[in-house]
Image (tube, rainbow, N blue to C red):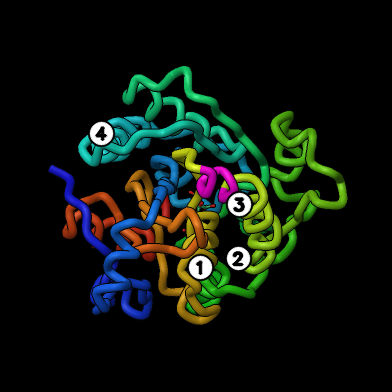
């Protein structure tokens, strides 16, 4: 049985959320009259490349069988148990996010929901790390370097070169045909990714949230970290400690008049399961050799 709870410092050490601590009666009355709306963000289910522990980024990996099951048993079950309803949904242009969204919507009997898939919500481009096993890269370059590529705010992986086995399939992916050539990345840090994700979020998605539409976003680990950093004002340093696991819905609530965040960021999962999945996501994982 899923249950919800706010992120506390014990779970994501330095990640502090904005909660109401004590309020005067007038402020309480204001809270009670406040119109709010929720936004749900989910990282797609496990992909074939998550399973193999490969840097994936803009490579278009399918969902694994387990990922498809988790979209049903973890994502859809939690949304249903929490009685969350949606008017519209967004995903990246990548198959793993689109597949997760379509499975979740089918489970919730929402197959007719308006859906937008947009490349601005794509995972960060992992540059020339694309296709390599994370543990093998740690053996070659050291764990510190690999964790810095993965989690530091402003560290770019080496740019992808034409001899990378996935260079051409990424460049020629029909799902990316509308991306202006000058905006097609060859590597991205979290900082660089935020330059495309946050304007899209603010100008397209958040306006709908403030207008009262109930929005579901299916995205990626780094995109979810970008949105958490932006919404919860996490510092450049502390964001490196935030890891977002596959399939577990993350719920934010906003004051519709002011756009301010209300209450705590909430992951819809049992606390032990959430902690286990966060540890798994943070870890460099195993080699396939
Ligand atoms: O690109 C990838 O390899 C993973 C994230 O990997 P880490 O940053 O956790 O290593 O992205 P996602 O599975 O969310 O699309």
Which residue is under mark 3?
201
Relative to 186, is 77 on the left or the right? left
Establish if 116 lies above or below 19.
above
Q: Is the C-beta separation of discs 3 and 4 under 8 Å?
A: no
User: Dot 4, how many residues are within 10 Å of its Cα: few (below 14), some (14-19), or many (20+)?
Assistant: few
Q: Is the C-beta separation of discs 1 and 2 under 8 Å?
A: yes
- Mark 1 or 2, closer to the camera: 1
Relative to 18, is 5 on the left or the right? left
Instruction: Tell me the distance, in whole angstroms, between the alpha carbons under discs 1 and 3.
Output: 13 Å
Q: Earlier in the sequence, mark 1 or mark 2?
A: 2
Q: Earlier in the sequence, mark 1 or mark 4?
A: 4
Kindly identify which numbered label has been placed on residue 207: none
Instruction: Tell me the distance, in whole angstroms, between the alpha carbons under discs 2 and 4.
Output: 32 Å
Q: Earlier in the sequence, mark 2 or mark 3?
A: 2
Of helix, strand and loop, which mostly describes the magenta segment? helix
SS type, badge 4:
helix
């Amino acid at each position: 049985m899923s249950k919800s709870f706010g992120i506390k410092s014990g779970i994501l050490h330095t990640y502090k959320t904005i909660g109401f601590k004590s309020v005067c009666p007038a402020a309480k009355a204001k809270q009670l009259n406040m119109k709010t709306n929720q936004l749900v963000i989910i990282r797609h289910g496990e992909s074939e490349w998550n399973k193999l522990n490969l840097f994936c980024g803009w490579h278009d990996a399918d969902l694994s069988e387990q990922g498809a099951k988790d979209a049903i048993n973890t994502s859809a079950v939690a949304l249903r148990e929490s009685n969350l309803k949606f008017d519209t949904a967004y995903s990246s242009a990548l198959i793993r996010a689109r597949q997760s969204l379509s499975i979740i919507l089918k489970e919730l009997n929402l197959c007719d929901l308006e859906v937008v898939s947009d490349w601005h919500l794509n995972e960060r481009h992992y540059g020339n790390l694309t296709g390599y096993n994370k543990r093998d890269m740690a053996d070659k370059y050291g764990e510190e370097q690999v964790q810095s590529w993965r989690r530091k705010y402003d560290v770019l992986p080496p740019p992808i070169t034409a001899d990378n086995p996935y260079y051409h399939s990424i460049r020629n992916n029909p799902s990316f045909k509308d991306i202006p050539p000058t905006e097609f990345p060859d590597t991205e840090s979290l900082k660089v990714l935020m330059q495309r994700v946050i304007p899209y979020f603010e100008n397209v998605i958040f306006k709908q949230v403030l207008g009262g539409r109930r929005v579901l976003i299916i995205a990626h680990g780094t995109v979810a970290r970008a949105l958490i950093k932006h919404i919860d004002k996490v510092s450049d340093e502390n964001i490196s400690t935030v890891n977002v696991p596959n399939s577990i819905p993350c719920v934010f609530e906003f004051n519709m008049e002011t756009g301010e965040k209300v209450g705590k960021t909430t992951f819809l999962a049992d606390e032990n399961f959430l902690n286990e999945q966060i540890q798994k996501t943070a870890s460099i994982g195993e080699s396939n050799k």
